[in-house]
Image (cartoon, helix red, strand yellow):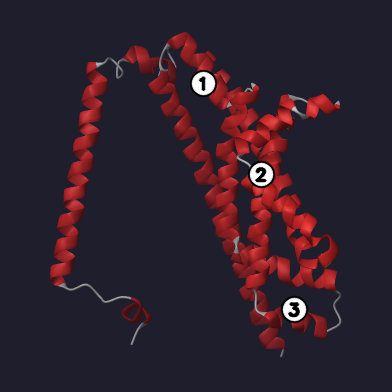
């Protein structure tokens, strides 16, 4: 008996036929909705060359200036996202390890920080960093206030992901490491954390994608990201549908590329682990 037949019953001819008919009906419905949307946009003049020319036509007089503004905004978005990702991963890993190895008398402090920051909406964290920290004399560029807000929220989420990955590992992993004389810190850094990162890679990538999307909240503190630049363009060209469509496509492309890089990294790590296993078996 195969694994597939245990997990679910193989569909028969009638079930396959019903599934095919259902898929066709849903596809036709979606096509109809899309056609209706396009017709409505066309009647409202949203599909004209005047609206889309600045975005798609290099011969248009505003094409170069428009993409120059979007390019600068995209660079600022990438900078904020990259910094927030690095800090969130580092601080989140440290929080996860600290919570696992902390003594009971101060563990409540680590747990309290994690729970408080998890419950705070990210937009409030960003606004707090930009409005409250300067009151204590901390004057920073707007970029760093956005990074601080994103890091404060996402680092605790990543901490819980990493902690869950470590706790999900079999106890034999740490016991075997202690048996060969490794210290507690060595067990965490060389045995448990690498396996936890591999096991929780999908969840970590999902959180990194969230960080990229949350950079768009920088508009509340006047950070000049790609969305802010799009709003400036909309005020001058009066084409909100076109510009928000372009911004949405840019975010989709960035997040898809991030997911593909993560998938490639995960495959490389898995391949290296399998190679190490083969070598160890041959030596034994």
Q: Is residue 20 left or right of residue 218?
A: left
Residue 284, given in percent of the width and then of the height, sits at: 71, 90
Does 174 sit above or below residue 258? below
Tell which of 102 and 143 is nearer to you.
102
Tell which of 81 and 65 is nearer to you.
81
Does 115 sit above or below residue 102? above
Question: Could you tell me which secondary element the residue under label 3 belongs to?
Answer: helix
Nearest to N terminus: mark 1 or mark 3 = 3
Q: Is residue 155 visible?
A: no
For image coordinates 67% across by 30% down, the residue present is 127
For image coordinates 79% across by 30% down, the residue present is 133
Of the numbered discs in the image, which one, if any, rests on residue 230? 1
Tell which of 48 and 142 is nearer to you.
142
Question: Which residue corresponds to mark 2?
Answer: 153
Question: Which residue corresponds to mark 3?
Answer: 174
For image coordinates 66% across by 39% down, the residue present is 150
**How far is the residue under mark 1 from the one under mark 3?**
51 Å
Q: Is residue 36 left or right of residue 268?
A: left
Residue 161, given in percent of the width and then of the height, sits at: 63, 59
Does 122 sit above or below residue 133? below
């Amino acid at each position: 008996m195969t694994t597939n037949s245990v997990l679910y019953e193989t569909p028969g001819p009638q079930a396959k036929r019903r599934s095919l008919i259902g898929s066709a009906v849903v596809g036709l419905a979606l096509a109809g909705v899309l056609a209706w949307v396009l017709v409505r946009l066309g009647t409202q003049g949203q599909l004209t060359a005047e609206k889309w020319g600045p975005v798609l036509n290099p011969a248009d007089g505003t094409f170069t200036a428009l993409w120059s503004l979007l390019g600068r905004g995209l660079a600022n978005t990438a900078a904020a996202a990259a910094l927030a990702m690095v800090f969130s991963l580092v601080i989140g890993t440290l929080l996860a390890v600290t919570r696992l190895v902390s003594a009971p008398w101060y563990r409540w402090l680590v747990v309290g920080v994690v729970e408080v920051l998890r419950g705070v909406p990210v937009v409030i964290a960003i606004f707090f960093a930009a409005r409250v920290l300067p009151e204590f004399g901390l004057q920073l560029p707007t970029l760093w206030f956005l990074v601080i807000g994103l890091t404060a929220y996402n680092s605790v989420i990543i901490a819980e992901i990493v902690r869950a990955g470590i706790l999900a590992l079999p106890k034999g992993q740490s016991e075997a490491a202690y048996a060969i004389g490794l210290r507690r810190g060595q067990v965490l850094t060389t045995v448990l954390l690498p396996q936890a990162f591999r096991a929780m890679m999908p969840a970590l990538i999902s959180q990194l994608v969230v960080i990229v999307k949350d950079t768009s909240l920088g508009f509340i503190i006047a950070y000049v990201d790609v969305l802010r630049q799009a709003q400036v363009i909309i005020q001058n060209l009066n084409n909100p549908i076109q510009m928000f469509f372009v911004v949405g496509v840019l975010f989709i492309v960035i997040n898809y590329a991030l997911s593909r890089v993560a998938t490639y990294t995960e495959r490389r790590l898995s391949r290296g682990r399998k190679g190490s296993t083969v070598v160890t078996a041959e030596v034994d």
